[in-house]
Image (tube, rainbow, N blue to C red):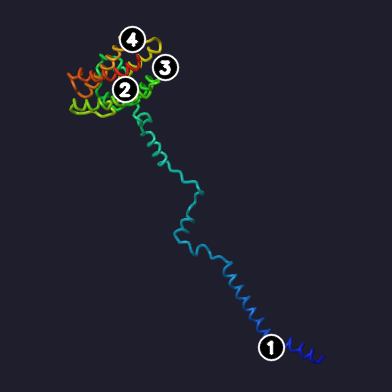
Amino acid sequence: MSNFEQFHLDFYQSNYTIDDQEEGYNSYGSNENLHGSRKSQTGDPPPTSAFAPSEMLLSTQSYTGQILQPTYSPSTHLGYADGFDEEPPLLEELGINFEHIWQKTLTVLNPMKPADGSIMNETDLTGPMVFCLALGATLLLAGKVHFGYVYGMSAIGCLAMHALLNLMSVPGVSHGCVASVLGYCLLPMVILSSSAVVFSLQGIPGTLLALFIIGWCSLSASKIFSSALAMEGQQLLIAYPCALLYGLFALLTVF
C-alpha cells in the first residue's frame, strides 16, 4: 500500500502554485478590458461631418426644395416650346411633298404641259416607288408575277440613262433625279397594265394601245429631262432611249 500511495502522490504532484493562478487571473482581466475598449472604439461610428467637406454641408443646409422635384423655370419651358415650334414637319424632313408629287403627276399625264425644271430636278422617290408597286400589282391581277423584272429593269434603265444624260448634258444629273423622272413617267404604263386585267392586249388593238403608251411615257420623260437639264433641241434624242426602256415594260404587260 505504501508503494501505491507514493505513486498516487507522484502522479498528482505539480509545480503549479496559487501565485501562478492569481497572475493568470490578472492577465485575463487585462485582456478583457483591452477587448472591451477596442469594441467601444469600433462600435461608435465617427460623425459624418468629420469626413464631409464644408461646401457640401453648406449646400445641404441651404437647399429648401424637395427631393426629385426640380425647381420650375418658365424660361426653360418657353425655350422647349420655341424649339418644337421651329422644327419642320416630319414629311418635310423625309423629303415627301404631296404638292410637288401632284404637280409631277399632272406633268406626266399632260405631255403638252411645260415642266417646271426646279421641281423636276428634285430627288423624289415616293411617287416612283408607288407607281412601280402599282405596276407589279396590276400585272399580278392579270396573272403575271413580274415584280423582280420590274425592279431589275428599272434599276438597269436608270443606270443606263444616267450615263447617257451625263454624256449629253453639260451640268450633269444625279442618279436620284433620273430614277425620279423615269419612275413618274411609268404612270401611263400602269394604265396599260390595268387595261390588261380587263381584256387581252394580244392583238391589233392591244398593240396600238401599247405603242401609244410607249410614246406617251417617252415623250413625258424627254420633256422633263430637256427642261430640267436645259437641253433645248435634244428632246427627240432623249426620247429614243426612253422609248426603248418603256418598250420593255410594254412587252411585260402585253405578253
**For mark 1, what is the residue?**
15
Mark earlier in primary sequence (4, 3): 3
Side of 134 relative to 3 (left or right) = left
The one nearer the camera, 220 or 37, is 220
The number of numbered discs placed on residues in the rendered structure image is: 4
Q: Secondary structure at mark 4?
A: helix
The crowding category of the residue bearing disc 2, from other C-alpha atoms within 10 Å (few below 14, some 14 to 19, many at least 20), is many
Give the mark nearest the N terminus, 1 or 4.
Answer: 1
Q: Nearer the viewer, mark 1 or mark 4?
A: 4
Q: Are marks 1 and 3 in contact (CB under 8 Å)?
A: no
Q: Amino acid at mark 2?
A: Gly
Q: Are marks 3 and 2 in contact (CB under 8 Å)?
A: no
Name the secondary structure under disc 1. loop
Provide the residue designation for mark 4.
206
x, y (%) of residue 113? 26, 15
Kindly identify the amino acid type of the residue bearing the numbered disc 4: Gly
Q: Are marks 2 and 1 in contact (CB under 8 Å)?
A: no
Residue 17 in percent (x, y) is at 69, 87
Q: Earlier in the sequence, mark 2 or mark 4?
A: 2
Q: Position of residue 159 (x, y in %)?
A: 27, 27
When asked about the image quadrant of residue 26, the answer is bottom right
- In the image, which disc is placed on residue 143? 3
Residue found at the very far right of the displayed protein: 1
Q: Tag 4: Cα neighbours inside 10 Å, few (<14), some, or many (≥20)?
A: some
Along the line of sight, the residue nearer the viewer: 236 or 98: 236
What SS does tag 3 mark? loop
Q: Could you say which is closer to the camera, residue 16 or residue 40?
A: 16
Pointer 3: residues within 10 angstroms few (<14), some, or many (20+)? few
Q: Quadrant of residue 242?
A: top left
Q: Which mark is residue 183?
A: 2
Residue 88 numbered mark, or none: none
